[in-house]
Image (cartoon, helix red, strand yellow):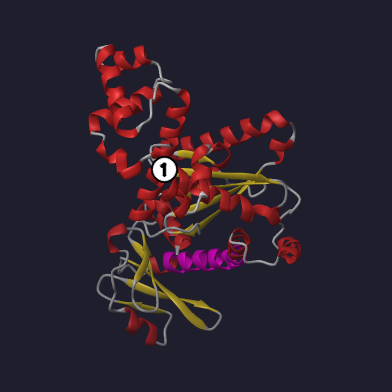
Amino acid sequence: MEELKKLMRQAKEILPYSAGVIDLSGKVIAATEDDVVDTTDSSVRAVLTSGDMFAGTADKIYYKILIGEQAKYVVYVQSNDPDSKVSLQLLSEWIKTSLKDKGTDADKIVFIRNVLLDNEIREEIPMTAREFKIDCKIPRLVMVVRTTADKGSDALEILQNFYTDEEVANVIAMDEATSIVIVNAQEAYESEDSRDVFIENVSQSLFTCLNSEGCEANIAVGSLVRTFQEISKSYSDAMTALKVSKIFASDNHISRYDKLGLGRLIYQLPRSLCEMFIEEVFPDEAYKQLDEETKMTIETFFDNDLNGSETSRELFVHRNTLVYRLEKVKLKTGLDLRLFEDAVLFKMATMVRTYIDYLDASNDRMIR
C-alpha cells in the first residue's frame, strides 16, 4: 500500500493528468490526487468483468494489472485521449515491476519484524538471515520512531530516504504510527568512549532529519547489541524507554534506555509495592493536601538543586516566604526538603505517585 502511494506521488511529477490505483473492491488505494484516496469507483466491476484489458468511461481510461493470470489491481488515468493508453500501460508495468521487487522485500520485513518481536527461533535466525543477505555478526542499535497515525507514512518515507543504504540501517514500519530503525553499530564498539557519542549522534541526526521535514516524532533508543539475533532485546529496551519517557519526561523527544535513571527502576516495580511505599512516605494522602503554589515551589526548589537563594529569585518571592512554604510542606508531610535525605525521599515518592496515576489512567500496561 505504501509503495503504491509512493509511486503515485512520483507519477504526479511525470503525468499530465490525474491517475490512480483501485483494488478489486473498487476502492481507490493510491492516487496522484490525495482527495480521491479511499473513495469508491463504481465502474471497476464492469472493468473487471470485461474481456478486454482496457475499458473507458466519459472521463477515464482503465487498465487491468494482472499478476500471473489474476487481476490484482485496476489502474486509471483521468483522460479520454487514446494516446494516454500508452502512459497507462507504462504505469502498469512500473507498478508490476515495483510489486515484484517488493515481494522479496516484504518477506524480509516480515522476518525482521518477527525477530524484533522475538517470534523467531534464535538458533534458526542466522540461516534465514543469510537468505536476505543480513550479516548477523554486525552489532546493532534499535530506535523506535513514534508519530501520530496520520503522520506515520510521512515519517516512514523520510526515514527511508535518510537511510538509503541497508548496510547502514534497515527501516521498517511496525504499525501505522511506529517506524523502526535498526542501525549498524560497529562504530560504537571501536572504543568504550565512542558508544555514548555514537548513540547521541545517531539519535540527534534522526531527530533533526524528521524535524527539518516538519514531522514531529518521539524517538526511543534501545541498548546496543552485538548480533542481529539480539535485536529483540534492543527493541524491547527502546519500547521501555518510550513508555518511561512518556510517564516521567513527556516533554523529551528523545529517550535513551541507558539514560532513564530512576524512572526505569520505578517502572519495573509492582503496583502493590509502589502503593505501600506511598502510604509510608505520604500517610493519609498527605501529598494531596499540598496546594498548587506549594507544589510549584517544590518543583522549582528541586530544579535549583535545593538552593534557596536561586529558588527565591526565580519565584520572585522573599526568602522568608520560601522558608514558610517549605515549613508548610514539613508540617503536612513530615519531610524537611532542606535536608538531602528528605528531599530524595520526597522526589522518589512523587515519581512513584506519577507512575501510579499513569497506571490508573492507562489500559496499556504491557510493553509490546
Residue 347: horizontal and vertical position, in percent? 42, 33
Q: Is residue 132 magenta?
A: no
Q: Is residue 90 magenta?
A: yes
| Residue 332 visible in the snapshot | yes
Can residue 168 be seen here? The reply is no
Q: Which element carries disc 1, helix, strand or loop?
A: helix
**Is 122 left, or right, of 142 in this rendering?**
right
Query: Where is 217 relative to 323, above or below?
Result: below
- The number of numbered discs placed on residues in the rendered structure image is 1
Residue at the spot 60% in from the left edge and 62% down from the top edge? 105
Residue 32 or 203: which is nearer the viewer? 203
Question: Mark 1 — residue?
Answer: 280
Q: Could you tell me which residue is drawn at 26 percent across and 13 percent down?
A: 320
Label the magenta part by its dominant secondary structure. helix
User: What residue appears at the point 50 percent right and 57 percent down from the top-left corner?
Assistant: 367
Residue 281 is situated, as x and y percent measured from the top left of the image, at: 40, 39
**Residue flagged by tag 1: what amino acid is it?**
Glu
Front-most of residues 268 and 59: 268
| The one of 66 and 362 positioned closer to us in this rendering | 362
Query: Residue 356: where, in percent of width, then height?
Result: 39, 49
Q: Specify start and end residues of the magenta stretch as a single range.
A: 87-107
Taking the image as shown, residue 35 lies to the left or right of residue 22, namely left
